[in-house]
Amino acid sequence: MSPKVYSLAIDRERCKGCELCVDFCPRTVLALSPKLNSRGQHYAFVTAPANCIGCAQCSDICPDAAIEIDEGVPSHA
Amino acid sequence: MRKRVLMNGNDAIGEGAIRAGCDAYFGYPITPQNELTSYMANHMQAHGRVFIQAESEVAAVNMVFGAAVTGRRAMTSSSSPGISLKQEGLSYLAAAELPSVIVNVQRGGPGLGNIAPSQSDYFQATKGGGHGDYHLIVLAPYTVQEMHDFTINAFALADRYRNPVMLLTDGRLGQMMEPLTLYSGLPHKIPPKPWALTGARGRKPNHIRSLLLEEGALEQRNLHLQAKYKTIMNELVGYDEYLTHDATVLVVAYGSSARIARGAVDQARAKGVKAGLLRPITLWPFPRARIRQLARKVHGILVVEMSAGQMIEDVQLSAGDRIPIAFEGRMGGGIPEESAVVRAMQRLAKSSPRSARK
Amino acid sequence: MSPSRKPSKTSRRSVYHRPVSLVNKPTHFCPGCGHGTAHKLIAEVLDSLKIREKTIGVAPVGCAVMAYYYLNCDISEAAHGRTPAVATGIKRCLPDRIVFSYQGDGDLAAIGMAETIHAANRGENITVIFVNNSVYGMTGGQMAPTTLSGQKTVTSPCGRDARTMGSPIRVCELLNTLDAPWHIERVALDSPAGIRKTRKALLTAFKGQMEGKGYSLIEILSPCPIHMRLSPMEAVRFVKEGMIPAFPLGVFRMGGKPAV
């Protein structure tokens, strides 16, 4: 049986670059982008989507509800 | 059949509130208004309404805030030091435009003072004891009947203008017993309150707030409030007159002082002084125009108040400086004697330049 | 602002989506602030219990004064500390609505301590959410009733000295001496597990209110990176290692009797 696949969406305008998701992710899926959002903050982005196990620790720890997670093959995979 | 009963002023306010449809009363004990709090404790629950003896006057006025945000009719009462505690709440109620009724049964001050009656909270009530540019509508009853009737009106006015309304009375009126006819009509209809917080079913969420940090927003709120106050000043001024048609000495007094002044007017007339009484019913808005009008023909004005002289400033502002304006009062819970008021009227009649010219 | 992402056509299920009860607007809270998390959890609970349209919240004075910008339900302000009194007025007039108050350290445990204790003592059927981040955030980081002994703040620059400034107040323990409260619990935003426990505690509290059980207070230990003068991750660690020892977690009261 093929392992489950997860896709993450991070709202870069909600994200304030606190990096809690990066720190708490057990699979180094996330990193802080060198780019800035319109509020001048670095935002988190998905650097290794294939590593994601859907544990949702990132969406739990995110104070800004910036991360959404779906299970399944994304249409643009 | 209209019921005629003998009641004390505080109880008459309580019964008036219940007949006006008061949904919630929150109070805290303080003399000389305790009869009102216990009247509400005894009667509100029987009518299925809310009664809470709050932990403080501060908590009580904030419970009124909470009840008022739901669109319900809410009231609190206290006496001078407790009303001081409520000032923050009154500013918030006015700012958020929450209909509400507040009763101040005044006692001697400042500080803890005493439990005797006074009228030394006039400034606090009419000039705003709380912070910011706001006004309460202030009503001043002078009989137990008016204690009852004005309470009923207060709820209607609060809803009509979306404003807190204060009943400014004193310990003497609160505790005296007089016959009165109880209101036998229905409560005034509550207007629709689309702004109320009832749960956002079928509509966008409502917010009740007075914190307006966005650029220009607070100024807009203030402009709106000032326009409302102007409307109230045009529509709501209330006063009563006694023998003013040919008076040369005008007495201006409200509440218990008006009762004394009325008797003094009769006595003065018997002694040859053509005295008359103007009794403000609304202390805010103040009957400026009528006093200005009367000031053109009388020879002098005597203000009677149980204070160091507070309402006299509004009389001076209204009347100008062409005629003498004198003051007769007692402080610290003292009650002016009728004879002293009569003598003050006689002095005024004698000393006024207009009398001399006559 | 990118829109909330719907599951794509080949997805099977949503693992996490932003709750409807959370307004889709970036918050003014600092990066890593626990208020954002607490707001998010409340919104999740309103969604999952389907009570958004019958809920009325009361916002404090403090960093969360603008709760009405972020929570998609009826909300009233309150004067500083008076939140439980306002909530009492609302709930007594509309007993079938769900009423919660949301407060910080100063609002609940300093200026509002009387209102806090008496609403609890009367057993008002409301849910009180107490965000304890050990400082006063909005006004610049002053000492709070919950500031730890020795903790440096703007008004305890040499560290909180018990001899002149008192010691931290444990609100759950204090309220647990009263007869009336139904549910008193302390949780912490110190980890994803802590956040899940917080979510569960809030769910239980709101459900209890729906069932007319009585007063609930959920104290949420929370990071305040800016005024703790720590990075967001260090602040979360401080909640775990510094605050939890001073404010033990757990259910103090469930079902109207002290659990301990």
Image (cartoon, rainbow, N blue to C red):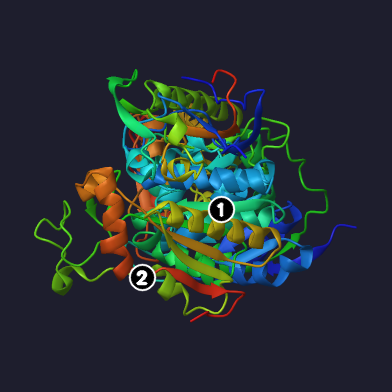
| Residue at point 58%, 36% (across, down) | C72
SS at mark 1 in the image: strand
Say which mark, if any, is on residue C100: 1
* Chain letter behind tag 1: C
Q: Earlier in the sequence, mark 1 or mark 2?
A: 1
Which residue is labeled 2 in the image?
C170
Circle 1: residue type = Phe
Quadrant location, the N terminus of chain B: bottom right
Furthest residue to the right? Answer: B1
Quadrant hosting residue B99 = top right
Q: Is residue B90 left or right of residue B23?
A: left
**Separation (CA) of disc 1 from disc 2:** 21 Å
Depicted C75 relative to depicted C258: above or below: above
Image spot of residue C208 (x, y percent): 65, 63
Image spot of residue B98 (x, y percent): 57, 41
Q: Nearer the viewer, residue B201 or B152?
A: B201
Quadrant hosting residue B181 = bottom right
Image spot of residue B66 (x, y percent): 57, 50
Q: Is residue B3 left or right of residue C230?
A: right
Q: Nearer the viewer, residue B7 or B93?
A: B93
